[in-house]
């Protein structure tokens, strides 16, 4: 579905194709959006197979699963673009006619960032929608890493369909129990980021995120993949496939580098303090505009 990080991947992908001079005379693109409906994603991918497309570019983990399932038994290639390592649910996804670009989880790096911003951190809150597979997986990873760091964990459930007043209530309740809050990658929190940020700032509690899209929306900081680079790398692979290179010779790309993003407005509001070396290398947003 529409989500800033996914949009960045798609826009960077399209821009890179233009750099390769892959215009409509060479490539016909049928862009579809499942609107967050996994069943619809399956139907769209099945239609791609029926239409005998040459390549399906699937952006986001659910889209990848739908595409890989749909092409089984066909010669259609899949270019999987996922912010998560394609291992747990799809152990053999990068085989056969499938290649792609995959990210590396930044959950532990976000928690480390929170500890650097607040060495006295004792209780960490997790605010997420357990119905979103990636969010649920990252929340479990966060709980495990917090255990290693001797941090207590409190969970707050926030459905992507929640109303602003429901979000405010959930965040306020969580803030009473924790020193800081983390929201993993997930679509639902994006639409409520303004409400979450306002409530967190009023409580003077830092809100950390797994993607820079939430920092643009008001989260204090995130350690995030470079989604623009993900899109560009995917386009480079797509060009090789379009030119006829076998999938077996198009090795999947794993992005292992990530960036720290900080919202300057929120930083001032909660009066957070980070080590100078973090501030010097971070990318800053203020009122949604990168600086």
Image (cartoon, rainbow, N blue to C red):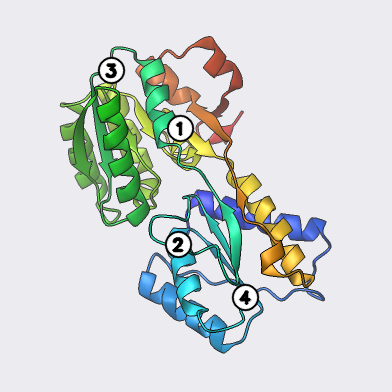
Q: Nearer the viewer, mark 1 or mark 3?
A: 3
Which mark is first along the chain, 4 or 2?
Answer: 2
Which mark is first along the chain, 1 or 2?
Answer: 2
CA neighbours of label 4 inside 10 A, class few (<14), some (14 to 19), many (20+): few
**Mark 2 — residue?**
1
Image height check: is 27 above or below 202?
below
Residue 36 location in percent, x, y? 39, 64
Query: Within the image, what quadrant is residue 50 found in?
Result: bottom right
Which mark is first along the chain, 3 or 4?
Answer: 4
**Mark 3 — residue?**
121
Image height check: is 213 above or below 290?
below
**Mark 4 — residue?**
30
Residue 226 location in percent, x, y? 59, 41
Q: CA distance from mark 1 to mark 3?
A: 17 Å
- Identified at 46% across, 24% down, the residue is 265
Residue 278 location in percent, x, y? 53, 18
């Amino acid at each position: 579905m529409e989500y800033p990080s996914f949009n960045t991947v798609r826009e960077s992908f399209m821009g890179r194709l233009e750099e390769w001079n892959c215009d409509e005379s060479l490539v016909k693109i049928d862009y579809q959006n499942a609107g967050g409906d996994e069943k619809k994603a399956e139907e769209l991918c099945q239609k791609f197979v029926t239409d005998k497309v040459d390549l399906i570019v699937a952006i986001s983990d659910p889209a990848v699963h739908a595409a890989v399932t749909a092409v089984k038994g066909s010669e259609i290639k899949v270019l999987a673009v996922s912010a998560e390592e394609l291992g747990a649910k799809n152990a053999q996804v990068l085989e056969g006619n499938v290649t792609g670009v995959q990210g590396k989880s930044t959950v532990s790096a976000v928690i480390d960032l929170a500890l650097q911003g607040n060495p006295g951190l004792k209780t960490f809150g997790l605010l997420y929608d357990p119905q979103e597979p990636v969010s649920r997986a990252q929340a479990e990873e966060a709980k495990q890493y917090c255990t290693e760091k001797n941090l207590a964990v409190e969970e707050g459930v926030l459905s992507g369909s929640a109303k602003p007043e429901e979000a405010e209530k959930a965040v306020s309740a969580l803030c009473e129990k924790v020193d800081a809050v983390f929201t993993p990658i997930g679509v639902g929190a994006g639409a409520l980021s303004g409400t979450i940020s306002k409530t967190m700032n009023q409580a003077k509690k830092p809100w950390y995120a797994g993607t820079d899209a939430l920092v643009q929306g008001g989260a204090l900081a995130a350690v995030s993949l470079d989604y623009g680079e993900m899109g560009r790398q995917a386009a480079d692979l797509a060009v090789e496939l379009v030119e006829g290179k076998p999938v077996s010779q198009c090795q999947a790309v794993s992005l292992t580098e990530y960036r720290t993003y900080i919202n300057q407005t929120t930083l001032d509001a909660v009066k957070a303090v980070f080590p100078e070396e973090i501030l010097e290398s971070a990318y800053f947003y203020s009122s949604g505009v990168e600086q």
